[in-house]
Amino acid sequence: MNPGSAIATFKNPEGPLYHGGAVAYALLAYGVGIAGLFQPSWITNGLATLLLAHGMTIAAYMLHECGHNIVFAENSANARLGRFLTWICGASYGTYEDIRFKHFRHHVDVDDVVWFDYGRFFREHPGVLRATQVLEWFYVPAHDLIMHFIMIFTSFVIPQRRDQRARNVAVILVRGALFLTALWFFPKAALCYALAFMIMITVLRFMDSLQHDYGYHLTLFSKEPSPRQGDLAFEQEHTFSNPHSFEDSWLNWLTLNFGFHNAHHAKPITPWWRLPALHRELFGDDAANVIPLSAQLRIFHKYRVSRVADGSADDDGDLEAWGRSFLVAAREGRVEGGNAASFLTSF
Amino acid sequence: MKRWQCQMCGFIYDEADGLPDHGIAPGTRWEDIPDDWTCPDCGTSKGQFEMAERVA
């Protein structure tokens, strides 16, 4: 192998810097963060927890880049990196292919396409709903932890994925043994890891929460084409961007520019560092076209309990009236947003 | 011959290779692929492809 061959495998000329840099940062933050959890100092533990959480978050967004085959020229190389990153961000119980499948159904069907009807689940289990709401009041991402719990036992819960049981059990044993060993011998480190994971989940769902105004539909395994398929105008009308800042672009690097969601949906194979420029090219420089961070924070705080029970399958709300008016309401902090839409959840 | 890239998932259709597993023979030009054909990787429509490279 010549020295340039590894670089040549990146899909974009800037890939070694931006994609390579993001993966290197994610792995470094993960490694240093894990090591920091085992230190005696509580301050070090706290800083390490934050670093670990951010490393996992960047790994998750790089997994998203791999899913769109943006990182490497060869799609098989994207898949290899993507599978590896599922281990970093705690999404390795199911398969990388299932994560991609659901994510592309979201893009192609212009819908939140799911298998698990959490609205019905909460209605049938009011005690679980109440416990989830109490935990959410304390900012514990309980709703998404339920989704993650299902993800852990994916092949035992989802009939269409029964053939993954051997792999699923192997992953549970490996990850479970590591976590329980840490919990037994280094309980502080294990709890800090769990906290870092919850911070990652919180960041991911904070970003997802307002990016679309349509509801979810139980059509993940349906062969019927979505009525919205290919409706690019509808897709843009009901997709919203929520960059952390419109002026200080570096702030958006904290989540690899995932807030420029209209640009991502307009051209999904655009690498993360080009999304701000694509947004300005397509939608202009008007900050009124995005949901500001201050409004997101207000919504995140104010509706953290009520949004848990807000969802119901096949309920799109008043989509005719939403779109632009949803954006206006979101900018004023008057919409609840949603949970459980992370691309790490493959059902 | 040309290569066409899905703007959704990055899948490449290479006219030289075709997609024999999907009934498209090697050498099949992009314009000869039916309009209702969908990306074998992500399922999006033919209209979501753009020419990525002119090979020869």
Image: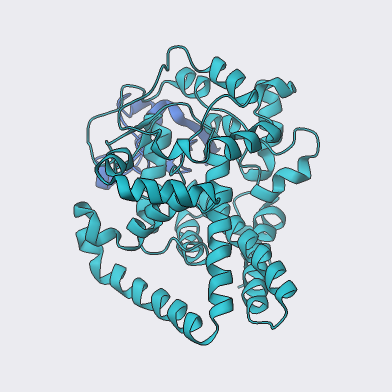
Quarter-of-image position of residue A300: top right
Pick the residue in front: A225 or A247: A247
Pick the residue in front: A195 or A6: A195
Residue A238: image x %, image y %?
Answer: 49, 23
Q: Look at the image and tell me whether residue A26 can be seen.
A: yes
Residue A126: image x %, image y %?
Answer: 30, 44
Which part of the image, by quadrant, shows the N terminus of chain A?
bottom right
Quarter-of-image position of residue A119: top left
Outermost residue toward the bottom in this view: A185
Residue A281: image x %, image y %?
Answer: 69, 25
- Residue A289's place in the image compared with A108, above or below, is above
Which chain appears blue? B
Residue A219: image x %, image y %?
Answer: 27, 36
Q: Is residue A233 left or right of residue B32?
A: right
The residue depicted at 52 percent of the width and 49 percent of the height is A64
- Residue B21's place in the image compared with A310, above or below, is below
- Residue A114's place in the image compared with B45, above or below, is below
Which chain appears cyan? A
Structure colour scheme: by chain
Q: Is residue A65 left or right of residue B21?
A: right
- Residue A1's place in the image compared with A252, above or below, is below
Q: Look at the image and tell me whether residue A72 can be seen.
A: no
Pick the residue in front: B43 or A58: A58
The residue depicted at 54 percent of the width and 51 percent of the height is A138
